[in-house]
Amino acid sequence: MSDETGRPRVASRRPGRSRRPVARPRALALVAIVLVGLVLLGEVASAILLRTGTGGTMEDYRRLANIRLVLGGLTFLVQLGAGIMSAVFLYRVSLWLHSRSSGSRRAWRWSPGWAAGGWFIPIANLVIPFLVLREMWDHLVSGGFGRSRAPRTLMIWFVAWVISPVLDFGPLAAFLLETNPGAAGFEALAISALLVRGIGGVAFMGTLWLFAATPPGTTEIEVFD
C-alpha cells in the first residue's frame, strides 16, 4: 500500500515495545544464590560472635556487641537484596514459562505476579510461594499436566520455611507464657533456628539453580538420578 505521494507506506511501530522473546534469566539466579549464601555466612558469623562474647570482660562483650550490630545491619541489607533478586528471578521465570505454554491445554492457577508478590503477604507467604513454585516446576518438566513431583530441594526448603518462624519466636512465646527454659533452653532454640535456616537456605539456593538450569521437558529420572 502507498500514501498520497505514491511512496510505500511503512508500518509504524510503537517506541519502547520490544519484540524479543521472553528468556530465562540465569544471571539473576546466580546473583540471588550468591546473596543468599552471604546471608547464611552472616548469620553464622553473628552466632559465632555471640558465642565468643560469653566468656570475656565487659569491654570485650561491648566490642563484640558493636561488631554484631554492624554485621546484623549488613546481613539485613544483603537479605533484602537476596529477597528482591529472588522474587524478580522467579517472576521472570514464570513469565518465560507462561510464554512457552501459551495455547496449552493446561491452565495456570498462579500468574507471574504471584511468583513475586506472594512472598510479601503476611502468613499466606508461608504457603503461597511453595504452591507457585510447585506449579512452575510442573510446567517446566512436564508441560503442566501434573506428571511431575516437586524436587527434593523445594520440599526441604518448604519444611524449613514453615518451621523457622516457630523456632525464631520460641523465646517470645516462653516470655508470654511466663516460662523460663533457662540459658541452655534459649541457646538450644537459637542453634536449632540457625540450623533450620541454614538447611533451608541451602535448599533454596539449589531450587533457584534448578529453575535456572533444568532444560524444559526434563524427566524426573534425569533430575533426581
Image (tube, helix red, strand yellow):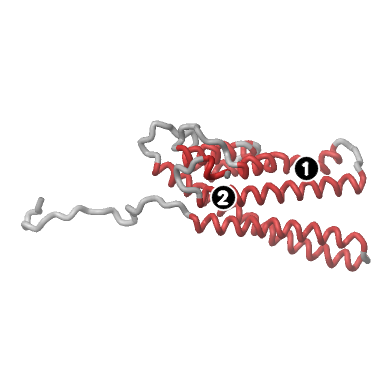
Q: Secondary structure at mark 1?
A: helix
Which residue sits at x=7%, y=54%? 4
Nearer to the camera, 205 or 48: 205
Considering only vertical position in the picture, is 20 above or below 58?
Answer: above
Q: Are marks 1 and 2 in contact (CB under 8 Å)?
A: no
Question: Percent from the top left, x then y, of residue 115?
Answer: 53, 43
Left or right: 1, with 119 as reference point? left
Asked whether residue 138 is in view, the answer is yes
Left or right: 218, with 154 as reference point? left
Count of numbered labels shown in the rendering = 2
Nearer to the camera, 97 or 213: 213
Question: Disc 2 residue type?
Answer: Leu
Question: Percent from the top left, x then y, of residue 141?
Answer: 48, 41
Question: Percent from the top left, x then y, of residue 135?
Answer: 52, 37
Which picture quadrant has residue 15?
bottom left
Considering only vertical position in the picture, is 147 above or below 120?
Answer: above
Question: Disc 1 residue type?
Answer: Leu
Sort mark 2 into few (<14), some (14-19) or many (20+) by Cα contacts within 10 Å.
Answer: many
Residue with the mark numbered 2: 208
> Which of the two discs, 1 and 2, sits closer to the camera?
2
Nearer to the camera, 51 or 11: 51
Question: Percent from the top left, x then y, of residue 24?
Answer: 45, 52
Cα gap from disc 1 to disc 2, whole angstroms: 25 Å
**Which numbered circle lies on residue 101?**
none
Asked whether residue 112 is in view, the answer is no
Which residue sits at x=57%, y=43%? 224
Which residue sits at x=78%, y=62%? 68
Which residue sits at x=68%, y=47%? 200
Which picture quadrant has residue 78?
bottom right
**Which numbered circle lies on residue 167?**
1
Left or right: 107, with 75 as reference point? left
Q: Secondary structure at mark 2?
A: helix
